Image (spheres, coloured by chain):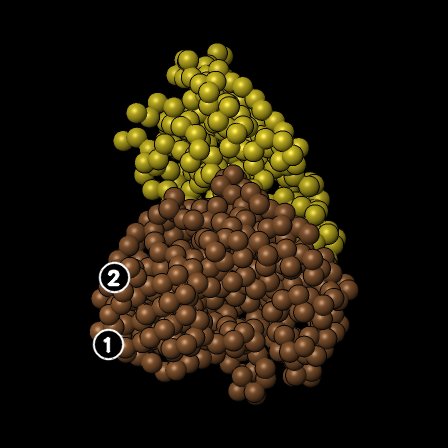
Chain colours: A brown, B yellow
Amino acid sequence: MNILLKNGHIIDPITQQDTVADILIIDGVIEKIGTSISADKKIETREMNNKVITPGFIDMHVHLREPGFEHKETIASGCLSAAAGGFTAVCCMPNTNPAIDDASVVRSIIEKAKHVHNGIVDVYPIAAATKGREGKELSPMMELAEAGVVGFTDDGAPIESAEIMRRVLEYTSMIDKPIIQHAEDVSMTKGGAMNEGTISMSLGLPPMPPVAEDIMIARDLKLVDYLRAKYHVAHLSTAGAVDLIRGAKRKKLPVTCEVTPHHFTLTDEAVRTYDTNTKMNPPLRTQEDIDAIKEGLSDGTIDVIATDHAPHSYDEKQVEFIYAPFGIVGLETAIGLSVTNLVKTKVLSMMQLIEKLSTNPRTILGLQQIKIVEGEKANLTLIDPNIEWVVDIQCFKSKSKNSPFDKYVLTGKAIGVINNNALYFE
Amino acid sequence: MPLASRHLLGLDGMPKDDIQLILDTAVSFREVLDRPIKKVPTLQGKTIANLFFESSTRTRTSFELAERRLSADVVNFSSDVSSVRKGETLKDTARNLEMMKIDMVVMRHSAAGAAHFLSQVVKANVINAGDGAHEHPTQALLDMYTMREKFGKLEGLNVCIVGDISHSRVALSNIYGLTAMGANVSVCGPKTLMPRNIEQLGVKVFYDIDAALRETDIVNVLRIQLERQERMLFPSLREYRQYFGITRERLEKAGRDIVIMHPGPINRDVELSADVADGNSSLILQQVLNGVAVRMSILYLLGTRT
């Protein structure tokens, strides 16, 4: 794969570049970076007109649904959705059937991904922390790590027992992989469908109190302090959680966290129409939570933006609100929502946004950093940060269309991605 | 003026004029119920389906009588939701009925928002006969009709709703409707059965039933459901009766005339003592009678709305 990108705005947090230049890529490797590079006429040339070129983005929280739920998403459709959304890598969550708790499942997923569009999207599985995600016995974490797993979680559900959490943290600290917690005290949220507040009351929907998230994080932080093992909070959503993580970081605990675009975009007001595409777990919270999340993003408390891409088929969501499954697709709206709500509003600089979508998740997961320098493999995300576009769920590459953002006007969109000697353009 | 909406999903946000219109129209239907021939041809040729996914004797019978007294054709579909969930979805059930040319659907369902969902997937007029812990608008309208009949007006009336406010669609619809009509609404019950931020709906909150009674003209007593105790939301029926049950002694202690209402069915001697339920100040059976008239009014206004 050869291509010449002319006049791209290179923003690379690792090498601290923020310059306009041409990039010549030959056989998937960055051959040359400079101004006015000319190349063989046979090489495809793209005029970037100052559009942004960054190290490839990674979404560390994606439900690819395969094996087991291929009617929602497959590795193939999920990877294409990732590429279309500007991601060159995803981490897939273990709540599949069978769960990702066995090395053979890990190998099969990685192998399948290699055949999707020439393997343009790297898939890094996150395995179950406990066998079958049942919260009872430890999964074979060393063997799973050797097969290519980059972290452990029982996501979809929390690791409930403090004792199991302790053992899981101890065990993974031997191999230096993070434990990723879906933080929810389920004794408080059982049967719940949305955030507890004025809206849940007026809609008569069973509530999920925000403190149920804070309580689980508070408990876990005590364990992390005791054991000093890597701990990452998935899809944090409350002001209380932001405060807890900020405090833990001040104490230098090995703690990191992520937030989803929908949790910094929508509040529980969106649920008023009983649209099941506003049902997710954690649920949409309040404006105060959004304000706290933005502050946390800005001051570095929140390390990562991850989508919690959770595809569900049309029919699964066409039911009464309380019966609908939790979750929305996120890969193809992540950049638009981030640029619109964070960069345009000056919560984050473009450089900081790139850190949260590339540099920081790679650090947390122990993956090699991507550098935009000559001689390195080209692993790039290309973004038009100024384009205004209208979200059309029917155009999603994901097999599922369950998004509350249909018809939203967003600023900023991926133009294409380059990785593993392959390219994907819109 | 016709009603603003072609469905009756709830009283949240319903214009005062619409509530007024429903109550005013109900007066003439109430008069029909006293005639020897209790039937008018108003909805002749219209077909109404009663979909009851949750057991209900009173509401379903009341709707069916209202429909028949308006000369509509009526079909009934009852099923408990768990068996429905195993088979057909609500959307499919509704669409199938629609192909049979149903004009209006009355639905009771255990899921909050089910009536909203139904109104989005069928063309028929949808009347919410109770959706989970959300709303029960026809119950609140018949409650308001009964209060207005007794006191001549709703504005300025002091109404206290007592019981499990958290899980009560009757409470929520009453709060929306009564506050829209200018009544002063208070709620009273154990804190574990009271939603957080309930005062944001413009109601006064009491945890002391005697204090609540001292300030009210009407007490609307809700049925206490046993499964709440199983979910550890209150200690025992005995304790509930002692601290929140409406008894003659308690009413006498309040030192004012208080009218008793209850949406039924009553747990006698739990939330309401038998002598109060059957006493002179009880409007409970009047509510049942008025329910038919109010439902006739709603069916008429929606069924003839162009």
Amino acid of disc 1: Thr
Q: What residue is disc 1 on?
A: A35
Check contact, mark 1 vs mark 2: CB within 8 A: no
The label shown at residue A41 is: 2
- Chain label for disc 1: A
Please name which of the two marks, 1 or 2, marks the residue nearer to the observer. Answer: 2
Depicted B119 relative to depicted A187: above or below? above
Give residue A314's position: percent from left, percent from top.
49, 41
Q: Is residue A253 visible?
A: yes
Give residue B196's position: percent from left, percent from top.
53, 61
Who's the residue at 42% across and 26% down the image? Answer: B124
Give residue A404's position: percent from left, percent from top.
41, 51
Q: Residue furthest bottom?
A: A251
Q: B294 or A406, which lies in front?
A: A406
Depicted A74 relative to depicted A422: above or below? above
Q: Label 1: state its secondary structure.
A: loop
